[in-house]
Image: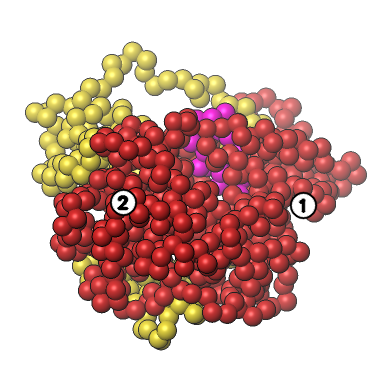
Amino acid sequence: VAAPAATPMLLLADIDEPGLCTLEVYERRGGYRSLRKALAMEPQEVLEQLKGSGLRGRGGAGFAMGTKVSFLPKGSMEKYLVCNADESEPGTFKDRELMQKTPHTLIEGIVIASYAAGTSKAFIYIRGEYVLQADILDRALREARAAGYVGENVLGSGHSLSLVVHRGAGAYICGEETGLLDSLEGKRGNPRLKPPFPAIQGLYQGPTLINNVETLTTVPSIIAMGAEEYAKLGVETSTGTKVVSVSGHVQRPGNYEIELGIPSREIIYGLAGGPPEGREIKCWFPGGSSSPVLLAEDLDVPYDFNSLAAAGSMLGSGAIIVVDDSTPILDVAMKTAKFYRHESCGKCTPCREGTNWTVKMLERIDAGEATPMDLDIMASVQEHIIGNCLCVLGDAMAMPIGSMIAKFREELEAHMEAARIRAGLDGSGASDSALAAQGALAEPPGTLLGGDGAGDQAPGAHEGAPGTHRGGA
Amino acid sequence: MSTVPRFEHGSRVPGWDAPADLEKDPAEIPDPAETPVPPDLRSEIEAHMANYPDRHSAALPALAAAQRLHGWCSPEAIDQVACVMRVTPAYLDSVATFYDMLETAPVGAHSVYVCTNISCSLCGADELLETIRRAAEAHPSELNVRAFECLGACDIAPMASVDGVYVGPLGAEDVPQLLDDILAGGPILPDKQLARRRVADPRANTEDYPLHPPEHEREGS
């Protein structure tokens, strides 16, 4: 499969040029010209450009960015812009590369967006693990302030903006917009009830615009080339280019910039080299671990928001994880479910309990204690999570797990049966020792207490039970 | 997995949910006169508080600063942050217990986060974690080896973050050198650092640019 031809590189063009993270090189390459161009327009015109570009949010939900900006009420109240740099979706690492190598593009995008939205205070909420990237952003921000691109009266336009890099401390849920706001306010990152949506009542109760790093990094290109030109890229409902992170069982994992709408096969095989020699694709996550898995037969689905939705999955954060035929699907399901169990904040019951019980049921399969009926129960647990929580973290487990049960039922049943035979629980009496272990239940509890009664405690036992507090990984 | 004491048959050991001390009064905002705070820590926390319209927003950076100084969010560290921020220790406890990177018990000095999420585990992260854990057993006060959720570096899977420095892809053969580098306090596996890598997309760069410098050679870091 050939790599896609002639994709315009808007985000990754010459991204490895030495010193691009410094203002000097960035300006030499035409940096902050889009900002000057935007400041020469009325904010309403900039907003029209964003709307006209058809740019959809690159963080996961794919909401039209210009429309989101227009939701912010007019008026003199304090408004905020928050850049969501808490990139924690498994498989996603596009924002990391963009922030590390071209931080000024992000800052320029933030200033332009804040001008269009009328916000005077902005924050970049970056995940705490990205130490290098946060340091680079801090340094770039100091340069931008000194050069007058950020601060009071930006370039004499009358628009003022304060910008702060805020470091998180390790929590997937803080990538959810309202969880992020709580975290930015200095609390536990629990999601909030919506509505009111952040555009009406967000950070410090003020109207807040929240956008992903890649979305904001794209803004300078849109202003530079004009909304009409930008909208010609990609397909009608998914315009522009997108950085796709490809990982897992591929020969050349990494970030690739693609025009939306190209066949997924060209990304996985043409760009990332496909799975190792002699192996076949078993399934792939098209948009991070939260997206329902697709199969090898779905490889010709165009990679854009609507086509992937029509195929029963989603573009999400644009992170493709490829799983080849050497890995049992149960392992993938277990990793996925354990991740969401660990990251569930515990606020909503369906998510807190559903993620926990899904893991337990998957462990039953592996231990040979499950029956095919358990798959139905597990599928029904997923259905009861979806749509029943304040945020979509639970859904983000339920969708891929549900898709795995639906698409790999035969393999899961075979796994189950093999494990039952291995454990000697199939009624053949093949393994007496396993049955003897069962018999241990009859003994009085006192003799079973391991050591000091905390024998099964994992390292890091100070952390609470899974879900209710935040258990160890 | 469970952190609640259990019998082997799965039932919880009685008393697992007993509160520590119901009669105790809640701790109040620490009195500045009785809570010595190192001047550097105080000024760092105050600088963070000045960044936000609401001082509570400084909780995460302030706790991170205190953890750098004390090694973990100890009661002493929490009291010092509470004293400067004028909040109760319980409020900060509620925050510290939520976030993976804030330690609520003493740990080894250097954090080694091994990503064990989907992409990394497809590439052998679980075996890597076991190898690192076994090798690190001899240095419990120096090393804090943890399985971690997706660190956002699936392109160098399997990988680890050592005090914030991303290195990968790592094999079992890299582990002795990794530990030597950490214990020697020098740069961590310079050739394997994420900071050095070029973007994967071959169409992105129009020239054959050199590799980036590793983290310890970067300007200003």
Which residue is drawn at the image coordinates 20% and 44% (left, top)?
B51
Give the quarter of the image for residue B37.
Answer: top left
Front disc: 1 or 2: 2
**Which chain shows up in red?**
A
Q: Which residue type does callout 2 highlight?
A: Pro
Contact (CB < 8 A) between labels 1 and 2?
Answer: no
The quarter holding residue A442 reads top right
The chain letter under disc 2 is A
On residue A407, the disc is 1
Q: Secondary structure at mark 1?
A: helix
Locate residue B187, reporting x and y percent.
31, 70
Q: Is residue A248 left or right of residue A32?
A: right
**What range of the chain is rendered magenta?**
A335-356
Per the rendering, the mark at residue B163 is: none
For label 1, the crowd category at 10 Å Cα-Cα, with few meaning under 14, some 14 to 19 and many 20 or more, is some
In the rendering, what colour is chain B?
yellow
Residue A43 has which mark? 2
Please name the predominant secondary structure of the magenta segment in the image: helix
Mark 1 residue type: Lys
Indicate whether residue B99 is drawn in magenta: no
Question: Which mark sits nearer the N-terminus, 1 or 2?
Answer: 2
